Image: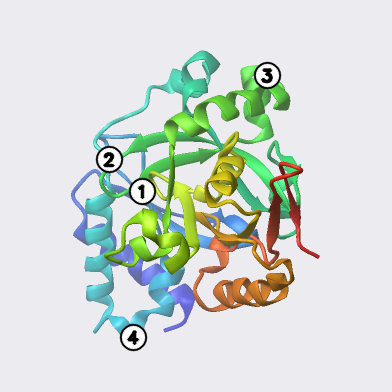
Amino acid sequence: MNYEQFKAAILIQMQELLEPGTTLSLQTICKNNGLKLDGLVISNKQSNLSPTIFLNYYFEKQDLFPDLNAVCRDIQRTYEQNRCEESIHADFFTDYSVIRGHIAYRLINYKKNKELLQTVPYIRYLDLAIVFYCLLHFSETGNATVLIHNSHLKLWNITKKQLYKQACQTTPDLLPYDFRNISALLGSQHSEDDLPSFCPMYVLTNSQKLYGASCMLYPGILEAVSEKLGYDLFVLPSSIHEIILLQAENSSRHKELAEMVAQINQTELAADEVLSSHVYYYSRAEQALRICR
């Protein structure tokens, strides 16, 4: 069965599995870093928020399932876990005074997203771009987000500068930062006060682990961390969802660290989770972040 046959078979069987009144559609979804995936959108009458399930993954991982029925049952289970019973009023997206409290920013790679950046407001930042989205819904299984396009700015009659200012205010409130030693995340029994000498490597993300690399934009956060540790910092972009901070005791280590970042990008991350292949350096004296060359 080739991929086109696989998609057609999934649509037929899923329609039989889902409750009456549920509709299915296949859409090409543009993900981060130029990745385009086939999204199965499942809609019901109870909500105008629809989870999207990517079929590319299931086609590539068919060996994990005994047959097509098992694939469809897993898709159904994923849908049931992520379906939303709420609806968003139509005025929600048109009234800026309502939507502004849900606006946040995130970081993506500039070169890998040039096609996307032609359609969305953005701000250059080092080798990255700051883009904006609406955070719509919190649930036990995740969040609903909508990327903000240039058309939204026209609809709301605002400028990119106003959008950025709003995101700077709301992002730290919507998604407070989470900073801890990496060994704590791995189940270490050491207290955080003991960790700098034991394992001086820290993870900075946000409370939802969602686009947490953008926490390095939060006002004063890198300054506060570097002052606490008493060193300049190496900043490793481990994914779009988090960064790793290390004490920059030896500034010549950036080549070794760049190799570490490259390995993480190639072996640990999905293509749309990669942020950058560069290592960054935060200087306490300059209170500025730059790329290690």
* Left or right of residue 123: residue 271: left
For the point 28% across and 50% down, which residue is it? 141
Count of picture labels = 4
Q: Residue furthest right?
A: 293
The quadrant in which residue 6 appears is bottom left
Marks 4 and 1, how far apart at CA: 24 Å
Q: Amino acid at mark 3?
A: Ile
Q: Nearer the viewer, residue 29 or 222?
A: 222
Disc 3 target residue: 158
* Left or right of residue 135: residue 161: right
| Chain-order first, disc 3 or disc 4 | 4
Asked whether disc 3 touches disc 1, contact meaning CB atoms under 8 Å apart, the reply is: no
* Left or right of residue 202: residue 236: right
For the point 54% across and 46% down, which residue is it? 225
Q: Name the spot of residue 272 as percent of width and height, x first.
A: 56, 62
Disc 1 target residue: 51
Foreground: disc 2 or disc 3: 3
Q: Which quadrant would the C terminus be assigned to in this image?
A: bottom right
Tell me the crowding category of disc 4: few under 14, some 14 to 19, or many 20 or more residues within 10 angstroms, Cα based: few
Q: Name the spot of residue 188 as percent of width and height, x first.
A: 30, 66
Disc 4 target residue: 63
Marks 3 and 1, how far apart at CA: 29 Å
Q: Nearer the viewer, residue 50 or 271?
A: 271
Disc 2 target residue: 84
| Chain-order first, disc 3 or disc 1 | 1
